[in-house]
């Protein structure tokens, strides 16, 4: 198998891979990249400058593209969601800890984000390892969570759509969906916590009020700095993250500046 030039970004999550042109890889290199993603949760490739066609071609290696029902697509390429912060925009998309599409019955597997226009300062993205968070739970809480399912909903997108006007649509809002609180990665079997502050509403069989204290504890516990890495973008960089292994957070600290990213999301296969 291809040996990757890989540098870990923190103890539990994130690695930067150099000496690879994503637009020109063979199956062997792709298999090594896949293994790196499943091991590190999120991987980064600088100076790729993918064209929309190259972005789509690379994404299709991972699986079926999930065409966003919320984001505007890039003109001529509906598969690519435009993650845009305009200069005067008050809220930043993804500016809170979340797991992409956790509200879907078969939630997104990977997201592939390609930097298009970056602010002069700020705009980093943080990632938290939900596998490390699971590993460090007490045996007592692990046992409790193993028996729980939680409801996930995209209803919060209604508010986002009001603020983000023509760049975001709430038309796709669907029914809530139920997932295990502890999931197993379908390829590696790695266990991870699967609840997030943006989309999880309550535990199955519990009221919202009963669920909140434990959910709030898990949200804060799981994103403690020791389980995280923080990535500073540079022009042309591509990041790929595994939504079944990490949560992420787009820092909203570049007031008055534009930031434009292109994102493709890959469909998942259902959670175990
Ligand atoms: C996202 O939440 O998917 C976008 C992350 C980012 O813009 O850094």
Image (spheres, grey):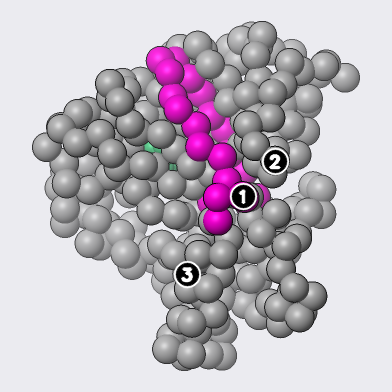
* Magenta residue span: 224-247
Q: Which element is circle 2 on?
A: loop
Q: Look at the image and tell me in which quarter the C terminus lies.
A: bottom right
Give the percent coordinates (x, y) of residue 109: 61, 46
Looking at the rendered image, the disc whose residue lies closer to the viewer, 1 or 3, is: 1
Neighbor class of circle 2 (other Cα within 10 Å; few <14, some 14-19, many 20+) is some
Classify the position of the N terminus by image quarter: top right
Q: Residue 14: x percent and y percent?
A: 63, 35
Residue bearing the label numbered 2: 11
Give the CA distance from mark 1 to mark 3: 23 Å
For residue 226, which numbered disc appears in the image? 1
Measured Cα–Cα span from mark 1 to mark 2: 8 Å
Q: In the image as oriented, which residue stretches furthest toward the left?
A: 88
Q: Mark 3 sits on what residue?
A: 200
For discs 3 and 2, the disc positioned in front in the rendered view: 2
Mark 1 or 3, nearer chain start: 3
**Residue 221 in the image: x percent, y percent?**
56, 64
């Amino acid at each position: 198998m291809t040996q990757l030039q890989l540098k870990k970004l923190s103890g539990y999550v994130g690695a930067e891979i150099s000496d690879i042109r994503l637009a020109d890889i063979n199956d062997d290199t792709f298999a090594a990249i896949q293994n790196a993603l499943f091991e590190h949760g999120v991987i980064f490739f600088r100076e790729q400058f993918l064209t929309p066609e190259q972005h789509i071609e690379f994404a299709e290696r991972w699986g079926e593209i999930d065409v966003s029902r919320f984001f505007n697509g890039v003109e001529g390429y509906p598969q690519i969601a435009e993650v845009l912060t305009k200069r005067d925009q008050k809220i930043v998309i993804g500016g809170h800890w979340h797991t992409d599409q956790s509200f879907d019955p078969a939630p997104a597997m990977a997201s592939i984000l390609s930097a298009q226009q970056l602010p002069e300062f700020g705009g980093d993205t943080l990632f938290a390892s939900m596998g490390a968070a699971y590993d460090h739970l007490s045996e007592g809480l692990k046992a409790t969570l193993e028996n729980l399912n939680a409801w996930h909903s995209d209803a919060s997108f209604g508010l986002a759509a009001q603020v983000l006007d023509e760049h975001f649509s709430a038309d796709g809002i669907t029914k809530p969906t139920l997932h295990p609180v502890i999931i197993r990665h379908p390829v590696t079997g790695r266990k991870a916590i699967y609840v997030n502050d943006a989309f999880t509403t309550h535990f199955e069989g519990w009221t919202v009020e009963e669920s909140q204290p434990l959910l709030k504890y898990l949200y804060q516990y799981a994103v403690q700095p020791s389980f995280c890495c923080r990535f500073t973008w540079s022009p042309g960089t591509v990041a790929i993250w595994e939504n079944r292994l990490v949560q992420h957070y787009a820092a909203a600290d570049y007031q008055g500046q534009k930031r434009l990213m292109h994102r493709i999301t890959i469909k998942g296969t259902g959670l175990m």
